[in-house]
Image (cartoon, grey):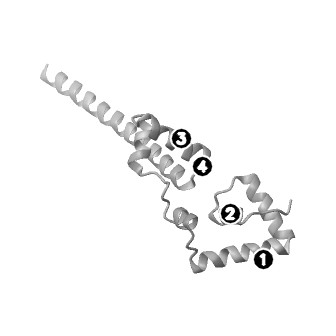
Amino acid sequence: MTDVTREQLHAYLDDSLDDAETARIEKLIRTSAAVRTRLSKAREERDRGEHTLGAVWRRERLSCLTREQLGGYLHGVLDKDLHAYVDFHLKTITCPCCLANLDDLREKQTEQAAQTRRRRRYLETSARLLNEARK
């Protein structure tokens, strides 16, 4: 129960753990001086700029997707391999940054669809009124 890895503490600081794991670690932080000390060290590592390959990879989000790739995923136009990677990145890794971008793209897509329907209605109404005026 008191076993927390350095990676889990960093994920906790990134707010990238699921709710159950976050709650478990927060309980350990409250009850264990050793875990509080390790958390403090993890924060210090971040403050001084950790330069391991993994830290640079996470900090620079090298495995994250572009908005164009996420848009292609949303529209189902990616090739099979890229689609599989995007699926893995979103569903298995649950990257919070990419999930937020995907949610934003979905919201914009919904807004655009509503605007398109509204424009079509205006056009149809205008065309009907013009045809009635010509009669």
Q: Which mark is residue 87?
A: 3
The residue at which mark 1 appears reads as: 37
The residue at which mark 2 appears reads as: 7
**Closer to the camera in the image, 51 or 106:** 51
Which residue is farthest top? 135
Q: Earlier in the sequence, mark 1 or mark 4?
A: 1
Gap in angstroms between the C-alphas marked 1 and 3: 37 Å
Q: Position of residue 105 (x, y in %)?
A: 44, 46
Image quadrant where one finds the C terminus: top left
The residue at which mark 4 appears reads as: 94
| CA neighbours of label 4 inside 10 A, class few (<14), some (14 to 19), many (20+) | some
Amino acid at dot 1: Thr
The local secondary structure at tag 3 comes to helix
Image quadrant where one finds the N terminus: bottom right
Q: Position of residue 101 (x, y in %)?
A: 48, 51
Gap in angstroms between the C-alphas marked 4 and 3: 9 Å
